[in-house]
Amino acid sequence: MNPLILLTLGATLLACLLVVLGAHAYAAGRAQRAALIERLTASGAPEPLGRRRRFRGVDRRLRRTRPGRRIEVKLATTGLDLTPGEFLVYMLMSVAGVWLVSAALLAPFFGPVAGLIGLWAGNAFLNWQRTRRTERFINQLPELARILANATQAGLALRTAIGMAAEELEAPAGEELGRVADRLAVGHSIEESLGELTERLPSRELVVLVSTLVLSARAGGALVGSLRNLTVTLEQRKETRREIRTQLSQVTVTAYLVPAIGLGSLLLVDMMMPGALDRMTGAFIGQTAVIIALGLFTLGFILIRRLSKIEV
């Protein structure tokens, strides 16, 4: 046989062998990487007993993206026991359900509109959960300041006092202070640990408390007296916020009634004149009128919420 042919066959077999070995090494590397990510995820976020995480593949891919990391940060501040992948899948399922229901009850034109509203509602739900958790944390601040004052008056260090407060207080203050205590235990500074707390739960009351603790830890001073005075101030602000919330409850209900009236009017028109919405949204003028009406209802909701928002 021609030596050139033998050389070509040998080179071809060697190339095939290298391809097979390379594919095997690539597959083994991907398997090791997936196992490593699984172990790190499990060690970084331990699952509660009886709680099995779903959609792990979606969660791993989502965490690598910027929107996924943003969702992860928001979920961490809301206290919800959900991974970014679970939240995304549940939200998409809800959007699909709202899309189908709206298209069936109203008209096919309202399906995409309801889907967009559903996407906005998912983000609004996270913001609402974060605000709600922040409000609960603010209501616990007077008790937190009292515990820290008593602990420091008894001669305990600030790090120890924070750990004690984390054990005595209920969620969300107990959980958040537990995170601060864990970071302090591994060598992080008080300023850095408490600074991350104010980023997770932004509020003026918490900023004042953290500033008092950081300044006392850095420059010294009468920490007990400052915490006592701060406790009284926080109690007064708590009562003021409660009174304002009670007085503005009617305005808040009105803000949610405005879009509800719009939806109710559409359902009423469709019940009185079956097929009217299909005929209305079948033309460009009707679609434009519906979009303008939805925009006006949304604008009214936003304006009422802005006018009823009072910073204390």
Image: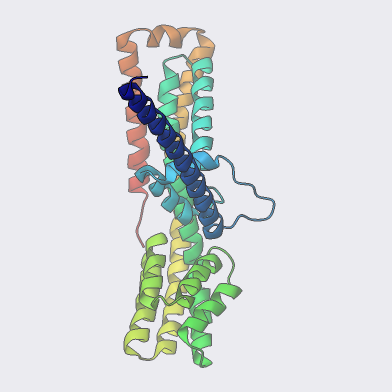
Visible residue check, residue 72: yes
Residue depicted at 44% across the width and 88% down the height: 224
Q: Quick one: quadrant of the C terminus?
A: bottom left
**Which residue is at the far right?**
50
Residue 127: percent from the left, percent from the top?
43, 48
**Which residue is at the far front?**
1
Residue 146: percent from the left, percent from the top?
51, 80
Residue 145: percent from the left, percent from the top?
48, 78
**Front in this rendered view, residue 6 or 74:** 6
Q: In the rendered view, would you say 151 is above or below 177?
A: below
Tell whether 218 sits left or right of 157.
left
Residue 216: percent from the left, percent from the top?
36, 85
Visible residue check, residue 248: no
**Front in this rendered view, residue 311 or 73:** 73
Q: In the rendered view, would you say 43 is above or below 230?
A: above
Residue depicted at 40% across the width and 71% down the height: 194
**Front in this rendered view, residue 98 or 50:** 50
Residue depicted at 55% across the width and 73% down the height: 166
**Front in this rendered view, residue 67 or 279:** 67
Q: In the rendered view, would you say 121 is above or below 202?
A: above
**Which residue is at the far bottom?**
155
Residue depicted at 45% across the width and 14% down the height: 108
Tell whether 236 sits left or right of 221.
right
